[in-house]
Image (cartoon, rainbow, N blue to C red):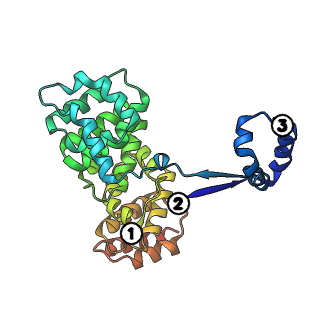
Amino acid sequence: MSHIWIFAPESQSLLQRCLNAASPPDPSNKWLQTFGPQNLDLINKTNDTIIVADSPENDPVSETQENVDDNLTIDIEQFLDPDVDILLKIDDLVEKCLKTPKILVKLAETLPTSVAEKFIEHIITAEELKTDFLQIFYKYFIPTYIKRENSRFCTNILLKTHAKYPHLLKITLKIILKDVEIENNVINDFFTNSNSDELTKLLEFISDVDFSPEQYTHNLFSIYTAYKSCTKTENIQNYMFTLLKHCNNFSSSDKNYGKLMLAFLQQEKGLKKNIDVLLLEELVERHKTPFKRPCLSILNEIKGNK
C-alpha cells in the first residue's frame, strides 16, 4: 500500500525554485544513463508528488490492556520480593514510577498490607522526596490503597497528609470522592477528626469539584458530616443552598439529603439573613424523607422572622 504526498499549493513556488536551481542532467552520470530515459516522463509527471510505500516494520503496534498489565507486573516484581526491604530500593522505585506512574496502582493493589503500610509511612515522613513523585503517589497509590483496605490506617493517612501536605491531600480527596466504589467511612472518619476551620476549607475545596448526580448522592453523608461541624461562613451557606437546589432533582428521597436540609435550615434560622424563602419552601415541600416535618417547622419559623 502506498501513500501519496502532494505538495501544498503554497509550496509550489518554492518547489519550482528548487527545481530551477538544480544542475542540468550530467550525460556521463551512470544512473542517468541506466535509468534516466525510461523514468524522465514519470519524473516530469510527478514533480509535485511524492509516493511513499508503507514500511511494515514501522507500523505502529497497538498495545492491549493485557500487554500493559503484563508489563506493569514485570516492572514491580523486584519490589515484591519478601526477602528484600522495599525501602532499600526506594530510589529505583521512585525513578521507575516517575517514568510509569501506574506502577503505583499495581503496587497499591499487590503489596502485602504490612509492607504497604511501611512504604506509606516512609513516604509521608521522608523529608527529601521529589515533588513530582509525591504528586503521583497521592494520585495513584493512596486512592487505590484506600479503595482496597478501607481501614483506620487509611484515615490516619489522610490526617497525616493533611497536616504535612494539605495541597497533596486535595489530589487524593478529589479522586476518592468521585469514585462511588470507594466506601466513604474513611472520609467520614477523616472529617470527624478535623477541626471546624479545616472542615470549612475542605468544603470550600469540595464546592469546586464537579460531581455527577450519582457522585453527589454517594457523598451526601460525608458532606453533611463536614458541614455540621464546620465554621458556617457565607460562602459555605451559599454552597449548601446551591447543593440542596441541585440535589433536589435526584436525591430528594435520600435520608442524608433530609439531614443536610435540616442542618442548613437550623443554621439559616440563626443567621436571620435574606434568603429566597419561596424557593426554600419549594425544596422542603418536594423532598421526601423523615426529616420533612422538622424542616417545615423550622421553615415556618424562618418565614415568621421575615
Nearest to N terminus: mark 2 or mark 3 = 3
Q: Distance between the residues labelled 3 and 1?
A: 91 Å
**Dot 3 alpha-carbon crowd within 10 angstroms: few under 14, some 14 to 19, many 20 or more:** few
Q: How far from the left and from the top, in percent, is residue 300?
A: 42, 73
Task: Report the residue marked by disc 1.
Answer: 298
Marks 3,1: beta carbons within 8 A: no
**Dot 1 alpha-carbon crowd within 10 angstroms: few under 14, some 14 to 19, many 20 or more:** some
Foreground mark, 3 or 1, reads 3
Q: From the viewer's perspective, tell me whether residue 119 is left or right of residue 196.
A: left
Q: Quadrant of the N terminus?
A: bottom right
Nearest to N terminus: mark 3 or mark 1 = 3
Nearest to N terminus: mark 2 or mark 1 = 2
Amino acid carrying label 2: it is Lys
Task: Report the residue marked by disc 2.
Answer: 273
**Looking at the image, can residue 196 be seen?**
no
Amino acid carrying label 1: it is Ile
Task: Report the residue marked by disc 3.
Answer: 22
**Is 127 drawn above or below residue 107 in the view shown?**
above
**Dot 2 alpha-carbon crowd within 10 angstroms: few under 14, some 14 to 19, many 20 or more:** few
Q: From the viewer's perspective, tell me whether residue 38 is left or right of residue 129.
A: right
